[in-house]
Each structure stands twice: as structure tokens, then as C-alpha cells.
Amino acid sequence: MNSRNKGKRRSYSSSPTRNHRSPTTSSGLAPTTSSSSSGSPPSASVIDAQFVTGDDDFTYLHDLTISPQDKFSNPRSFPYSVKQQCWEKAEKIKGRDPDRWRRDPLGNTIFRKLVGCPGCLCHDYDHILPYSKGGKSTLENCQVLQATVNRSKGNRTEMSRADLIQKSSYCRVSGRDMDLLELSAYGNVRRGQDSGGCIMQ
């Protein structure tokens, strides 16, 4: 019995990769493995079908610098805090709550809850010097302006005050109209400190 088994010993291949296909990447190249030998060349990886050695990657990242972008240091839209202060420096309307009503530089009445719409009470936060011409998104370069006027102004700097007034969307707003707008937007009516009237809740 033992003599038969001795004559039929199986032979094993010394190569662990025999009869096995090497996996390939989507680019058709076989992946490489890093060598633990200190004398072997640096491992390579396939990036965009090009071989880049590990040393090259490290050198590239070491020399990489990020240049500052103007859009981060000077955003196109005004920060929230600047908008708050910009509203505060606009002209107040006697008898009305200054947190809700103001006048733009052309004398147009604007309502704080209406922003970016085409109505006559709607306003925008406008760059006095247009952003496209180097204007900064700062308080000094900010003004609340009737939205219709702001659309007409665009990035033009040669328009006079008279020209801008002609572009204004005029509407006659009574005190009762203002009360109704406040009730709709805030749920109450608040008078300015100089009004001397009562407060409607």
C-alpha cells in the first residue's frame, strides 16, 4: 500500500501564479505592487493612463501652491453683515419703523421684506462702483436701491441722478397700504419712534 503511494506523488508548481490570470485595470495595464526591498525602484501607479512614480507625486505635492482667488477675497454678493449695515445707513421714513421701511438715494420708498422683485417697493443691495469694474463688496460701496433702477443701471457708471430717477418705478403708497403690507409680512404694524401714534398688534 505504501509502495503504491510513493510512486504516485503529486508534483506542485513552485510558481504561485501558474494557471492564474493576472487582474488588469480599466486601462488594460496590470497593477503593480510595491516592493519592500530598499534597493528596488519606487512603485508606479496608473493615473490617466500615464505612469507617475511615487517620488514624482511627492515632489509635485511639495511644490504645489494655491494662488489666491479674487472671488473669495471679494465675493460678488454682499455679506449678510454688510447688508444689515447698508440698510441702516439708508434714509428713514418719518412715522414708519426704520427696520421695515427706508428710502433709497433717489427718494423711492422700499420695504425690507421685498428683495430682488420688480415691484416699486422692492430693493436690491447695489454696488455703487459696479463689481465688474473693480467695485468691492464693502459697506462703503453699498447702497439700497429700488430694484427696477438697479436693473436699468447695470454696470454703467455714466448715468446721472436725473437719469436714474427717470428709470424709477413710481407708485403712490399710502400709510394704510404700508399698514396692510406690514400686517401681511410681519403680522403686526409698528410705528417709528417719531410718529407719536399707537402701535397696532
Image (cartoon, rainbow, N blue to C red):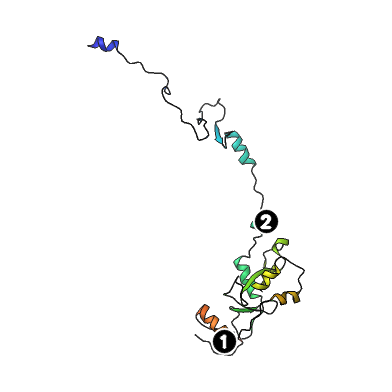
Q: Position of residue 56 (x, y in %)?
A: 61, 35
* Image disc number at residue 176: 1
Q: Residue at point 75% right, 74% down?
A: 163
Q: Position of residue 94 (x, y in %)?
A: 64, 85
Q: Residue at point 62% right, 39% down?
A: 60
Q: Residue at point 63% right, 68% down?
A: 82
Pointer 2: what residue? 70
Q: Nearer the viewer, residue 15 or 62?
A: 15
Relative to 42, say whether 79 is above or below.
below
28 on left or right of 104: left
Residue 55 visible in the picture: yes
Q: Nearer the viewer, residue 164 or 201?
A: 164
Q: Which is nearer the N-term, disc 1 or disc 2?
A: 2
Q: Nearer the viewer, residue 79 or 149?
A: 149
Amino acid under disc 2: Asp
For marks 1 and 2, give the CA distance: 46 Å
Amino acid under disc 1: Arg
